[in-house]
Amino acid sequence: MLRRKPTRLELKLDDIEEFENIRKDLETRKKQKEDVDVIGGNDGEGAIGLSSDPKSREQMINDRIGYKPQPKPNNRSSQFGSFEF
């Protein structure tokens, strides 16, 4: 492998401005998220998930991820298809 001299990186004014803008955006998002967490904590929604029965906790998780379980039919035709003997 050939050795070469390190590449010189130049910091431009545009790069600094972009960095500052991104940092400010991240800070505002973080602050908004903290505000939402504080408001949600006052409503007691966080405590409901921890203290409720497991069925409602499972339902809350299913709602959050968008999973809608369908009940399974218990007849033999649904399990094995419509075979004729």
Image (cartoon, rainbow, N blue to C red):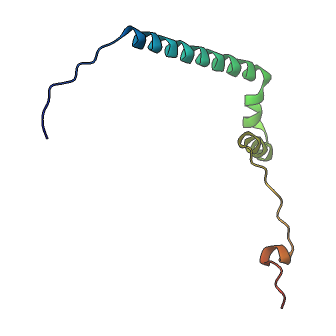
Q: Residue at 78% x, 26% y: name it.
A: 44
Q: Is residue 55 left or right of residue 25?
A: right
Extreme bottom residue here?
85
- Residue 4 % position (x, y): 14, 30
Q: How many marks?
A: 0
> Of 45 and 76, which appears nearest the observer?
76
Q: Residue at 29% x, 14% y: name it.
A: 10
> Of 85 and 40, which appears nearest the observer?
85
- Looking at the picture, does residue 54 appear above or below residue 76? above
When asked about the image quadrant of residue 42, the answer is: top right
When asked about the image quadrant of residue 7, the answer is: top left
When asked about the image quadrant of residue 61, the answer is: top right
Q: Residue at 78% x, 78% y: name it.
A: 80
> Of 3 and 75, which appears nearest the observer?
3
Quadrant (top left/top right/bottom left/bottom right) for the C terminus: bottom right
> Of 60 and 17, which appears nearest the observer?
17
- Residue 33 % position (x, y): 64, 20
Quadrant (top left/top right/bottom left/bottom right) for the N terminus: top left
Q: Residue at 45% x, 9% y: name it.
A: 17
- Residue 12 % position (x, y): 35, 11
- Looking at the picture, does residue 1 appear above or below residue 19? below
